[in-house]
Image (spheres, rainbow, N blue to C red):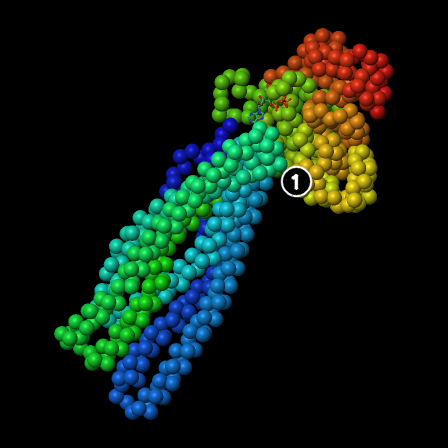
Amino acid sequence: MPSPHRMIPPGAPEKKARQGTFKRIAHTFKPYRWKVAFVALLILVTAGLGLINPLLIKVVFEDVLLGDETASDRLNLLWVVGGVMIATPIISGLLGLWQTYINNVIGQSVMQDLRNSLYAHLQHMSLRFFTSTRVGEIQSRLSNDVGGVQGVLTDTASSALSNVAIALSTVVAMFLLSWQLTLLSLGIMPFFLWLSRKVGKVRREVSGQTQESLADLTAHMQETLSVSGILLSKSFGRQGYEIGRFRGHNSRLAALEIKRTMVGRAFFAWVQIFFSITPAFVYLLGGWLLLRNNLNMTPPQVAGTIAAFTTLQSRLFFPMGQLLNLNVEIQSALALFDRIFEYLDLEHDITDRDGAIVIDPSTIDGHVSFEDVWFRYDKDRDDGDRSWTLGGVDIEVEAGQLVALVGPSGAGKTTITYMIPRLYDVERGAVKIDGFDVRDIKLESLGDLVGMVTQETYLFNASIRDNLRYGDPDAKDEELVAAARAAHIWERIEEMPEGLDTIVGERGYKMSGGEKQRLAIARVILKNPKVLILDEATSALDTHSERLVQEALRPLMSGRTTIAIAHRLSTILAADKILYIDRGQIVESGRHDELLAKDGAYASLYHEQFSDGTVESRCEDGLVLSTGEIVSEEVP
Ligand code: ATP
């Protein structure tokens, strides 16, 4: 079975994929481009506003404190400058708030879109994908990975522009004040750029590993903390083992998280140290130039320039630190996006063909045919005939007939039934309903035509009403009751204090096996498909329960084409045709008595499984048997 990851073209060039990632991220923002443009405008305005106060400091020093105007003129100027210095931060604070709000709206919308398209994409993946991928891994991509990009979308992307604007405008202002001091302040930048690239690379790797580790942890929790998982570990006394495995995953994750944080933090620490010591250099150089009289400035001008310059410089620290760290952040985010896009790129191997048709179920009789059907689960495997699970299967089921599939375990019975609703596609040959190749019918329409009752009944942890309505979302309560009655489960529902509103529990664990099966049958009665696939449960129900299930099946099967993987004698005896399957081929076919008379594979299976004295007790469907022979038959 190919792993889902191998569904991505092997050896897809990584670098190209990275470039593609940027483009695709930009594409996800496309619907919100006007909002993005507005945020950009707000950012530019705020950055511009941020320059006013540092530059006003120069005015305070030069013209107010050390100026040569009259005291009252200087005082008036001080009031004006003070007023502006108070108003500017208030305005830019409010604009910043507005910008944060729109940022968040954009970020959340993009996340919502990503989650929606990922979920929709997964809903259309074939069974092949789900049988070969851990559920927890899938859940982790949907929640952890998409959740992980939230910070990037709401913070990093928007603050990047804001930081660029602040940094650029500040650097320009610094240059205008003194190019010598600016060069001194920024001389070390190339070193930081180099460092940030290095750190970014490490961070990206660690991020990818962290998400993988998180997926392992989620998958492990999902597997072992489900009802079936906990039942298994309890019944085998393996709690200690599971706790140990969990601890292993958990400590790996913790170590990776620490590494990820520390790599980023160490880098930030370097930037912080640098920006903390540069003012000292500015004073040193400024003082030196002043004392050597190289600046062509008056002392008040020098004082104003240095005060404004150091203020601007401190304003540079935060955005520069963030910008240098941006590469690091982006690399981490890319790792997350890569994982999301990797899933979005998984090919849908079962899709609607061009020109696929929608069929009105009322125009269909329900004739099913398999024409020389060949199928294998692993297309890459090629070891001759052994790789084929089905090899040249021909089946004709007339409308309304009941066909029973019997045969040894692993023979391919379930696989045959999978071909009808296109859970898998045939590799050669065709499966047809009323002459229409199932691949020519739209999948949604095919879903309406075919109904399945599987061995393991799956119920959602919701009310009985909601579970039943899965078969027909528009069904009224009367119809639900009628279906439940027909499936012999209504009496049981009525006994429950909350009736149809009873919550069935995780996977329906609050109900017995037989009750769940009857609920599932009622659900399919409501769906009313033309073709029914019935995989009878092998798990033994007690006689009373089994009888109820059989009675529930009767109205479901009547007048409907039914293909049943039969484990019950009653189904086998009632079948219009029994197909004995072995190693993916139909070995014998006919009615029960015909096949018994043949004394072949079916006869041996029958004698082995049913005619051991248990026949009479097992057969309660209006069929009266005596030592394996049908004496009278009243098939309903
Ligand atoms: P049973 O009566 O035990 O349910 P079956 O006749 O229904 O058996 P299938 O489930 O159709 O048999 O399986 C036929 C063969 O295909 C088996 O050998 C099985 O191991 C294999 N098989 C089934 N599902 C898959 C899968 N998803 N991937 C690979 N091989 C599979």
In this rendering, the count of numbered labels is 1
Q: Where is residue 216 in the image (x, y as percent from the top left)?
A: 48, 38
Decide which of 423, 554 is in the foreground and name it.
554
Nearer to the camera, 27 or 308: 308
Q: Residue at x 33, y 78 (%)?
A: 56
Query: Please, is residue 423 above or below residue 30 in the view?
Result: above
Q: Which residue is drawn at 32% across and 75% down?
A: 55
Q: How many C-alpha atoms fall within 10 Å of the one at disc 1: few (<14), some, or many (≥20)?
A: some
- Up-down relation of residue 459 to residue 332 (above or below): above
Residue holding disc 1: 506
Q: Is residue 530 visible?
A: no
Disc 1 marks a residue whose amino acid type is Glu
Q: Position of residue 82 (x, y in %)?
A: 38, 81
Which residue sits at x=51%, y=43%? Answer: 141
Residue 201 at x, y percent in the picture: 34, 46
Camera-nearest residue between 360 and 341: 341
Residue at the (78%, 16%) spot, across then down: 615
Judged left or right of residue 68, residue 433 is right
Q: In this view, does 343 lie above or below 269?
A: above
Q: Where is residue 305 in the image (x, y as percent from the top left)?
A: 26, 75
Tell me the quarter of the picture where residue 414 sits: top right
Picture quarter with the C terminus: top right
Q: Quadrant of residue 467?
A: top right
Element marked by disc 1: helix
On screen, 114 above or below 129?
below
Residue 418, visible in the rendered structure: yes
